[in-house]
Amino acid sequence: MRVLIQRVKEASVEIEGKIKSSVEKGLLVLLGITNEDKKEDIEWLTRKLCKLRVFNDEKGVMNKSVSDINGEILLVSQFTLHASTKKGNRPSYIRAAKPEIAIPLYEAFITQMEYELGKKIGTGIFGADMKVSLINDGPVTIWMDSKNKE
């Protein structure tokens, strides 16, 4: 599993001209799922996301997590995070999981994230054509992969 995390002042996802979800201060998390991903990947990433210290403390140092600031999370599925650009100019998405594998993992990720955060999160709709808006705070953007735990 791969996530692209953006610290935001606000973010929203629009589907067919209507806002599906929006958040205030917190994290926008774009999630890419592969066929090899399992429950362990979900558990590791959701714990890490809720404890990742990317928010400023009183001294302006990134010492606080989204949980510490009682922030919000907007989770959006994004298969293009697993694009391969190795050959040619058209990205290949062969590593991205097919819906029959990805949807249950996406739903499990939502459930686990809400458990870790202790409240509901905002989401998009898996497979929908979504318009994502955000005000990136910082900017702070971090990439994490459960198969490459740096």
Image: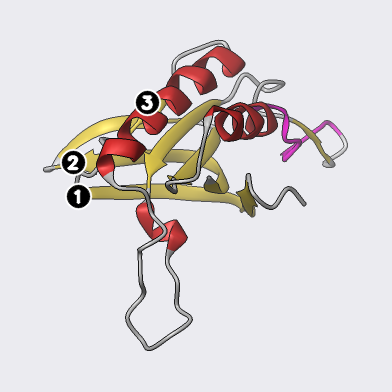
Crowd class of label 2 (few under 14; some 14 to 19; many from 20; radius 10 Å): some
Left or right? Give the position of 70 relative to 78.
right
- Pinpoint residue 32: horizontal percent, then vertical percent: 44, 48
Judged from the image, the secondary structure of the residue bearing numbered disc 2 is: strand
Spatial distance from mark 1 to mark 3, Cα to Cα? 18 Å
User: Residue type at mark 3?
Assistant: Glu
Judged from the image, the secondary structure of the residue bearing numbered disc 3 is: helix
The structure's colour scheme is secondary structure
Span of residues in magenta = 50-58
Q: Which of the two residues, 56 or 13, is positioned nearer the viewer here?
A: 13
**Could you tell me if residue 84 is visible in this image?**
yes
Residue 62 occupies which quadrant of the picture?
top right
Q: Earlier in the sequence, mark 2 or mark 1?
A: 2
- Pinpoint residue 143: horizontal percent, then vertical percent: 62, 54
Q: Which residue is mark 3?
A: 107
Q: Which of the two residues, 130 or 136, is positioned nearer the viewer here?
A: 130
Residue depth check, mark 2 versus mark 1: number of the one nearer the observer: 1
Mark 2 and mark 1 residues within 8 Å of each other at the beta carbon: yes
Q: State yes or no: residue 53 in magenta.
A: yes
Left or right? Give the position of 76 relative to 144.
left
**Could you tell me if residue 121 is visible in this image?**
no
Q: Residue at x 62, y 19 (%)?
A: 70
Where is 90 relative to 4, above or below?
A: below
Q: Earlier in the sequence, mark 1 or mark 3?
A: 3
Q: Residue at x 26, y 37 (%)?
A: 100
Q: Which residue is mark 2?
A: 15
Q: Residue at x 58, y 25 (%)?
A: 71
User: Residue type at mark 2?
Assistant: Ile
Q: Which residue is mark 1?
A: 129
Crowd class of label 3 (few under 14; some 14 to 19; many from 20; radius 10 Å): few
